[in-house]
Amino acid sequence: MGKLKLESCPIQGLYIIEPTVFSDSRGYFVETYNRRDMEELGITLDFVQDSQSMSHKGTLRGLHYQKQHPQAKIIRVIRGRIYDVAVDLRSGSSSFGKWFGLELSEDNHRQLLISRGFAHGFLTLSDVATVCYKATDFYHPGDEGGIAWNDPELGVDWPELVGGYSGTPSPKGYSLRDGSPIILSEKDQRWPGIKEAFKF
């Protein structure tokens, strides 16, 4: 079937996957993952778990990472659109603390391949978004860490977001441009900034 195309990102270890989409009057068909194609592109990862989430507009999940069991991930959207972000947390990396983001949607069919050692999060831009995650390790309760989504040290430029940093990861004072509130879990309102988390 159609070949997957791999596009490098400004941060080494992140790749945009562009699948071939076959469209006609009935709709479309797309091959979202093919181990052989990935191996031909130099990506040899053993994916062991698929997960899926649904989020309402304004929901921000992240920025999450795994401490002892880091996962490589492929993120794609099958309904709606999100702004997806990865932050380099690899020890000794020349891009440590740098971030990369792009819009993933049901229309552009793009996927983001995130290597081990990155924090990940996303902001839901559509009324509803369904996100699929492909991971190289199983979920380990108690192994999750996180960084404040609005940490000024990171300076993630979340699109369509208005509001100013008040010193905490609280969503208070933030909204989308259309007035939709920013929705965070209790846990995501307690993560420290990157300097506090990594003591540098």
Image (tube, rainbow, N blue to C red):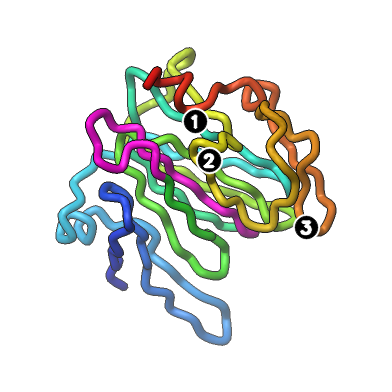
Amino acid type at mark 3:
Arg
Q: Quadrant of the N terminus?
A: bottom left
Q: Is residue 48 visible?
A: no
Upstream in the sequence, badge 2 or badge 3?
2
What's the residue at 43%, 29% (across, down)?
Answer: 65
Give the image location of residue 57, x and y in percent: 74, 50
Of badges 2 and 3, nearer the viewer stands: 3
Q: Is residue 46 visible?
A: yes
Other-residue count near label 2 (Cα within 10 Å), few / some / many at <14 / 14–19 / ≥20: many
Tell me whether the residue at label 3 lies in contact with that at label 1, contact meaning CB atoms closer than 8 angstroms. no
Residue at mark 1 to residue at mark 2: CA–CA distance = 6 Å
- Decide which of 39, 15 is in the foreground and name it: 15
Q: Which residues are magenta?
A: 80-98
Is residue 148 placed above or below 9 in the rendered structure? above
Amino acid type at mark 1:
His
Residue at mark 2 to residue at mark 3: CA–CA distance = 20 Å
Left or right of residue 88, residue 179 in this image: right
Q: Is residue 122 magenta?
A: no
What's the residue at 39%, 47% (across, down)?
Answer: 74
What's the residue at 76%, 52% (across, down)?
Answer: 176
Give residue 159's mark.
none
Tell me whether the residue at label 1 lies in contact with that at label 2, contact meaning CB atoms closer than 8 angstroms. yes
Instruction: Look at the numbered disc 3 and give the secondary structure of its residue.
Output: loop
Pointer 1: what residue? 64
Pointer 3: what residue? 177
Upstream in the sequence, badge 1 or badge 2?
1
Residue at mark 3 to residue at mark 1: CA–CA distance = 25 Å
